[in-house]
Image: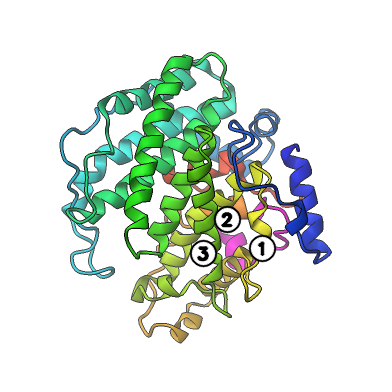
């Protein structure tokens, strides 16, 4: 079933409040090149783009070819914790130098993918694929243990998400070396299984669990791995099942002064995860928890909290650090806004989408990838 038709069917289900269970396919990969967007459609939209915000995002992009290759880190992955103590408070200055190679790698790969999506440049696609291959042949992202360095484990889930998402778009370029693509996807599959097995052995089910779900489902699609795909779908459902009566994710509300920030950070992997599932005929945007919640409830709560942070006082007394000036804060909203049945966005989100959004962990320029334009596809 074509992606647009699937979205239409899912939207009708939501509009009619009709149980969508009967139209769900089995939770397995049926279209390994489907990505989390309709790549051909997005190509066409970008070629004739007249949206000023999208044009601004395009103008700000770097290219893979203009960025220096990023040498893969070797040896054991040991990264200092993000916070000096616990899960909030002052940020540890020792972390940034250790994560720089991974961030630069994500930026170069996503730059090539974004440029290819806009221009169909084979040079950019090849550049991104060769950068991926350098890390794949080095076996990067495999030499770590969460008990030794939990931050290394977190970095793996983010970098794998970035690279598997990019690959899901790049595989649609037919000129890429098939042997290289196969080798690189096999590496991602190995990395995904390792991080998934660590997750299964633990009890962590906050935003990091969702990031590993995104990494698993993106890798599962490109490698036609039903185990990874199905596990990612399960992670999403578990997250939605935890949404409370207000729309908050309780584990993110426990992050004190960063509660709103972490509601956003949890939605950042959940919305593209659902978009990947849509591409395989599994309509996660329509999924309802036993208490009737959907991801839309979490999005609306976030929008209300941004507009009025006082509502978070129901969970934590601390004044909120929104971090809303960062280009990634509203990045998830691009995918949600274009999802079936999304409806009107909260005013807090609409304001946040006045500027382009960007997050390498979910593909780079999220405005270029799936930019929200009111009424454009609805």
Residue annotated with mark 1: 345
Residue at left 45%, top 75%? 250
Q: What residue lies at 28% left-to-right and 69% top-to-bottom?
A: 88
Q: Nearer the viewer, residue 220 or 50?
A: 220
**Disc nearest the viewer among 3 and 1:** 3
Q: Is disc 3 placed on a helix, strand or loop?
A: helix
Mark toward the start of the polypeptide (2 vs 3) = 3
Q: Is residue 219 above or below residue 10?
A: above
Among the two numbered marks 3 and 1 on one chain, the one whose residue lies closer to the N terminus: 3
Residue 156 position, x and y percent, is 32, 45
Q: Badge 3 local density, few (<14 within 10 Å), some, or many (20+)? A: some
In the image, residue 175 above or below residue 222? above
- From the top left corner, tell me how far across and down residue 308 is, in percent: 52, 77
Q: Which residues are magenta?
A: 337-355
Mark 1 crowd level (few <14, some 14–19, many ≥20, 10 Å Cα): some
Q: Is residue 354 visible?
A: no
- Relative horizontal placement of residue 132, taking residue 220 as reference (left or right): left
* Disc sitting over residue 238 in the figure: 3
Residue 21 numbered tag: none
Residue position for label 2 = 333
Q: Residues within 10 Å of mark 2 (few under 14, many from 20)?
A: many
Assess whether mark 1 and mark 2 are in contact (beta carbons under 8 angstroms).
yes
Is residue 272 inside the magenta stretch? no
Q: From mark 2 to mark 1, how far is it between C-alphas?
A: 9 Å
Q: In the image, residue 122 lies at what x, y percent?
A: 52, 16
């Amino acid at each position: 079933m074509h992606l647009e038709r699937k979205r239409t069917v899912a939207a009708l289900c939501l509009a009619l409040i009709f149980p969508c269970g009967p139209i769900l396919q089995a939770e397995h990969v049926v279209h390994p090149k489907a990505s989390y967007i309709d790549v051909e459609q997005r190509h066409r939209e970008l070629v004739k783009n007249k949206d000023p915000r999208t044009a601004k995002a395009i103008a700000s992009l770097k290219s893979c070819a203009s960025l220096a290759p990023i040498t893969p880190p070797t040896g054991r992955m040991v990264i200092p914790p993000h916070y000096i103590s616990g899960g909030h408070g002052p940020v540890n200055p020792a972390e940034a130098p250790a994560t720089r190679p991974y961030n630069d790698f994500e930026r170069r790969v996503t730059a090539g993918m974004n440029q290819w999506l806009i221009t169909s440049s084979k040079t950019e696609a090849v550049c991104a694929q060769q950068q991926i291959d350098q890390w794949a042949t080095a076996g990067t992202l495999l030499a770590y243990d969460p008990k030794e360095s939990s931050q290394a484990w977190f970095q793996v889930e983010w970098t794998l998400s970035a690279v598997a998402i990019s690959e899901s778009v790049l595989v649609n370029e037919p000129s890429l070396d098939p042997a290289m693509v196969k080798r690189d996807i096999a590496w991602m599959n190995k990395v995904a299984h390792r991080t998934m097995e660590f997750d299964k052995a633990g009890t962590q089910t906050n935003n990091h669990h969702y990031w590993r779900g995104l990494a698993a489902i993106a890798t599962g699609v490109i490698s036609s791995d039903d185990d990874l795909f199905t596990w990612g779908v399960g992670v999403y459902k578990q997250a939605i099942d935890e949404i409370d009566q207000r729309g908050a994710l309780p584990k993110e509300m426990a992050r004190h002064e960063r509660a709103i920030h972490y509601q956003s950070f949890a939605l950042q992997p959940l919305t593209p995860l659902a978009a990947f599932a849509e591409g395989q005929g599994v309509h996660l945007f329509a999924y309802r928890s036993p208490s009737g919640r959907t991801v839309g409830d979490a999005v609306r709560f976030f929008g209300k909290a941004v507009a009025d942070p006082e509502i978070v006082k129901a969970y934590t007394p601390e004044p909120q650090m929104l971090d809303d000036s960062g280009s990634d804060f509203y990045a998830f909203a691009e995918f949600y806004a274009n999802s079936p049945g999304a409806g009107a966005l909260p005013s807090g989100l609409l304001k946040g989408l006045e500027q382009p959004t960007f997050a390498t962990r979910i593909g780079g320029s999220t405005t270029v990838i799936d930019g929200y334009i009111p009424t454009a596809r609805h």
